[in-house]
Image (cartoon, grey):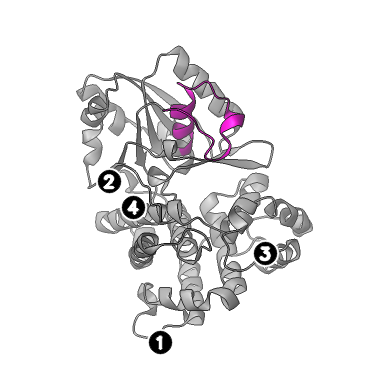
Amino acid sequence: MDFQTTRRIIAEPGCIAKLGSLARELGVRRALLVTDRGIFASSLHTRATDALKMADIDFVVEPNVVADPPEGMVLEAVTKARALRIDGVIGFGGGSSMDVAKVIATLVPSQQTIEEIYGIGNVRGSRLPLIQVPTTAGTGSEVTQIAIITTGETTKSGIVSPQLLPDIALIDAELTLGLPPHVTAATGIDAMVHAIEAYTSRHKKNHYSDLLAREALRLLSKNLLTAVNDGQNLAARHEMLYGAMLAGQAFANAPVAAVHALAYPLGGHYHISHGLSNALMLPHVLRFNLPSAHVLYAELCGCLEAAKGGPASAERFIDTLTGLVAQTKIPRTLQEANVPRADLPMLSKDAMLQQRLLVNNPREVTEADALRLYEEAWG
């Protein structure tokens, strides 16, 4: 077993106030704060910049991150960071901002090109100090060694290396208060997919990842609807953010599989959010995997709040989880998400490119299987 995670994690409401002092402990004097346009427009990022000011740390804000971040934008940010002599990077936002922050921190001091670091274990040398601050309870990117970058019009590539693990993760639920219900739902379901796929992964599944996945699923399923329906519930927001982090630790070590493989083309072609893409494919992939994963799904059944008090079975697990997703009122079919039915064969071909993920699935997925799953998800 080889288990890796972020070196230091601070999880408590209000801990963003410690950002400046923590950055100074890492030797940062001029930081790049990487965030997205929505956060920048809402001024939520000032919670971070105020903390940097209190510690007398100079900073520059990079506010141009978008969902499914394109390679060109990442490289522009790297050039900017080098020109400004940045000596530390802070990711502040959802998975896209944190992924971009990882790549910037890796490339700024490196002689490698971005093409050379795609894949597994290809990063050489050290990176700049890196702190991650999630503002959604979903990706778990603050505790993973993975970054996903859009490399073409519709294709994505992953960078997987221990150097991408940040030095510090700050888990502050106050930063997630008031997050819109549909975003809360999609990101929360994304985190649950991380936990489920880590628990059923064919490769690198271990006792630690199992413990983390089960606790993550318990916390997330118990608090999802409360967080969706009451955006100001700090206790529920904290449990969601904490659960997403545990799920991130689980899948960083026992990697995800077919749900993610089939979700990526949806994001690439139609810019459907990653969380919603996973939610759309989840019930269909679970039922497809049932012959190979029924024992593991039955074990997970007891982690679902809504399944307590009844018999534990794989079928009950899938039915309960599907019902929970339905109660969030996010789109449930590809048709509702405006995916053209005529595109399903093309999506199936694209999904087959995700062999890095498909090899982890408990049941082999062929292109014909992928097409059938997309057809089921279309409605």
Amino acid type, mark 3: Val
Q: State the mark number for residue 311.
A: 1
The three-letter amino acid code for the residue at tag 4 is: Leu
Q: Position of 229 compared to 51: left or right?
A: right
Kindly identify which residue carries mark 4: 241
Q: How many neighbours does mark 2 have within 10 angstroms: few (below 14), some (14-19), or many (20 or more)?
A: some
Tell which circle, 1 or 3, labels the residue nearer the N-terminal end.
Answer: 1
Residue 319: image x %, image y %?
50, 77
The quadrant where residue 277 appears: bottom right
Q: Is residue 331 visible?
A: no
State which quarter of the image contains the N terminus: bottom left
- State the residue in front, 80 or 93: 80
Residue that lies at the very extreme toward the front in this rendered image = 1
Within 10 Å of disc 1 (Cα), the crowding (few <14, some 14-19, many 20+) is: few
* Tag 2 residue: 174
Which sits in the foreground, 46 or 293?
Answer: 293
Give the mark nearest the N terminus, 4 or 3: 4
Q: Nearer the viewer, mark 4 or mark 1?
A: 1
Q: Is residue 116 magenta?
A: yes
User: Residue 365 shows which numbered tag?
Assistant: 3
Mark 3 packing: few (<14 Cα in 10 Å), some, or many (20+)?
some
